[in-house]
Image: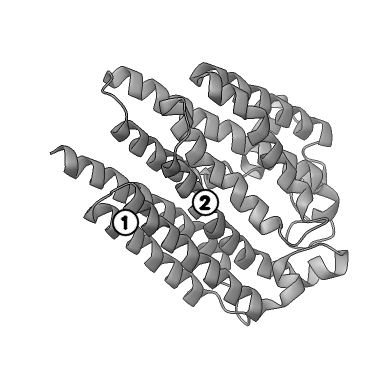
Amino acid sequence: MVSPLARLTIVLDLIRWQHTVFALPMALASAVLAIDASPPRSAGWWTWKILLIVLAAFAARSAAMAHNRWADRDIDATNPRTASRPSVTGAVSPGFLLGFTVAACLVFVLISGLINTLALALSPLFLTVLLGYSHAKRFTALAHIWLGVALGLAPVGAWVAITGSLAWTPLLMGLAVVPWVAGFDILYALADIEHDRREGLHSIPARLGARRAMALAAVLHVLSVMLLLILGLVAQRGLWYTIGVLAAGALLVLEHRLVRPEDLSRLPSAFLTLNGLFSLAILAGVVLDVWSRGT
């Protein structure tokens, strides 16, 4: 019999907690911009807020991914790529996954309450979007956009955590995240074209075919970089920010060069490594930009 601790370890691996590297750097970049725009406070206050942002991001993503594995266990069972997942083989029961999801949601709401009143008020909406993504591909090919919106909430939430209010800067950053995430999710879905068509699931590659889906992903990634550059103008950022955005854009170009319809062997590395570096490049650009202005 598998112990609860062993099942928890399996779930943490199943939900790919390390993929938090996609949204968390964007949230931290937004937090740094919010700190730069806020009145001076003690280092301890900023540290506490950043810690809460990190914990909230981890809880939110854990809830979303555990729910996704629970909701998709029947679909995953029909896909050779995912048939060996513990959620399919029974190594982790549906009840344990659902319980983990509920616990992660409660932790997210609790942390939101510790952050401020607005964060607490927005937490049910955020969770609705995050958990809803797991069901979107059953009825719309725009599920990729839905995922983009879900991750785009990260910089908005981080700004709220620091300032207790909303502003154009985090909204623009969140808007830029939407096409970036939708683009790489379209690329990732290339691996499941035949499965999605056979099972009647909705995805852009299944509907448009590999080449047209890749072209659309490229357009979305160009749009994301353009929105980030517009953000730099609106927020009056400097050279380091622009360098960070251009470096991130270069990583997306490399991603599209690595992935080909006839050769998807490098898709996993392009998906995880380059998109993780993309968000880290944005964070580095923001941090260096803010630091250079303060020196």
122 or 103: which is nearer to us? 122
125 or 17: which is nearer to us? 125
Q: Which amino acid type corresponds to the residue marked 1 in the rendered image?
A: Gly
SS class, disc 1:
helix
In the image, residue 143 sits, relative to residue 211, either above or below, namely above
Residue plotted at (56% across, 54% down): 178
Q: Earlier in the sequence, mark 2 or mark 1?
A: 2
According to the image, label 2 marks what residue?
A: 175
SS class, disc 2:
helix
3 vs 201, left or right, is: left
Q: Which percent across, then down, holds residue 270? A: 51, 65
Q: Is residue 204 shown to the viewer in this render? A: yes
Disc 2 crowd rating (10 Å Cα; few below 14, some 14-19, many 20+) is many
30 vs 37, left or right, is: right
Q: Is label 2 or label 1 in front?
A: 2
The quarter in which the N terminus is drawn is top right
Residue plotted at (52% across, 40% down): 154
Which mark is drawn over residue 244?
1
Q: Which amino acid type corresponds to the residue marked 2 in the rendered image?
A: Leu
Residue plotted at (76% across, 31% down): 2
